[in-house]
Image: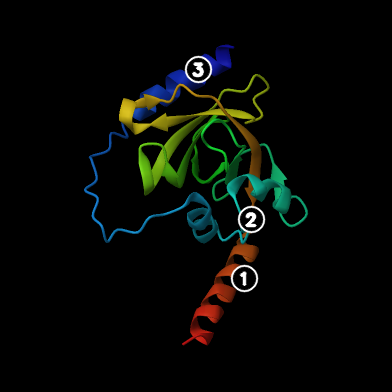
Amino acid sequence: MMKRLTAAALAATLGFFTLATPVQVEARDPYWQCVTFARMFSGIQIFGDAWTWWRQAVDRFRTGTSPETGSVLVFQPHGRMRAGHVAVVSDVLTDRVIRVTHANWGGSRGKVEENVTVVDVSDQGNWSRVKVWYNPINDLGTTEYPTYGFIYKTAAEAAAAGRDAVAEVTAGQ
């Protein structure tokens, strides 16, 4: 319980340093889905709804319960988030506090949010339940989201995926 309170206090403190200015939305701005963004940003080539990423990753990628920069955190379907959610870890701050970059979350529908604080609130410290910073209230959200864990990609795999993506684009020209 003390770890959970400490993590929440740290996340709240961090939030004071991440005050975002309102973003002007224009019709020509792209509308990002979390899976499209996570696939492009992480290089992990998995397709389909976010909740299916975990099952697809188990035989193709290393998976686990500890965050690593560049890994993808996979959220289980929960409440109105019926298709789950994926977010790319941009920084590991402590064993229970990370920052993610993700798209199409809460008050930022269709937009990308960078370096959003996420706190592990699971009893076991295994990232199976998290709270996510929510800009509209300028604090951690009140919902605890269940997660499957993290999907990891090695630098060599990411480089190969990048080369393949470039080859596909240039072949179509």
Name the amino acid type tagged 3. Thr
- Residue 147 appears in which quarter of the rendering? top right
From the image, tell me which residue sits under label 3: 6
- Asked if the residue under mark 2 is in contact with the one under mark 3, i.e. CB atoms within 8 Å, the reply is no
Could you say where residue 155 lies in the image, as x and y percent from the top left?
61, 61
Residue 16 can be seen, yes or no: no
Q: Is residue 132 above or below residue 29?
A: above
Q: Is residue 84 above or below residue 132?
A: below
Between discs 2 and 1, the one toward the N terminus: 2
Q: Is residue 102 above or below residue 40?
A: above
Name the amino acid type tagged 1. Ala
Between discs 3 and 1, the one toward the N terminus: 3
From the image, tell me which residue sits under label 1: 160
Could you say where residue 6 lies in the image, as x and y percent from the top left?
50, 17
Q: Is residue 41 above or below residue 95?
A: below
Report helix, strand or loop for mark 2: loop
Report helix, strand or loop for mark 3: helix
Find the residue positioned furthest to the top.
1
Residue nearer the viewer, 103 or 115: 103
Residue 105 can be seen, yes or no: yes
Residue at the spot 64% in from the left edge and 55% down from the top edge: 153
Between discs 3 and 2, the one toward the N terminus: 3
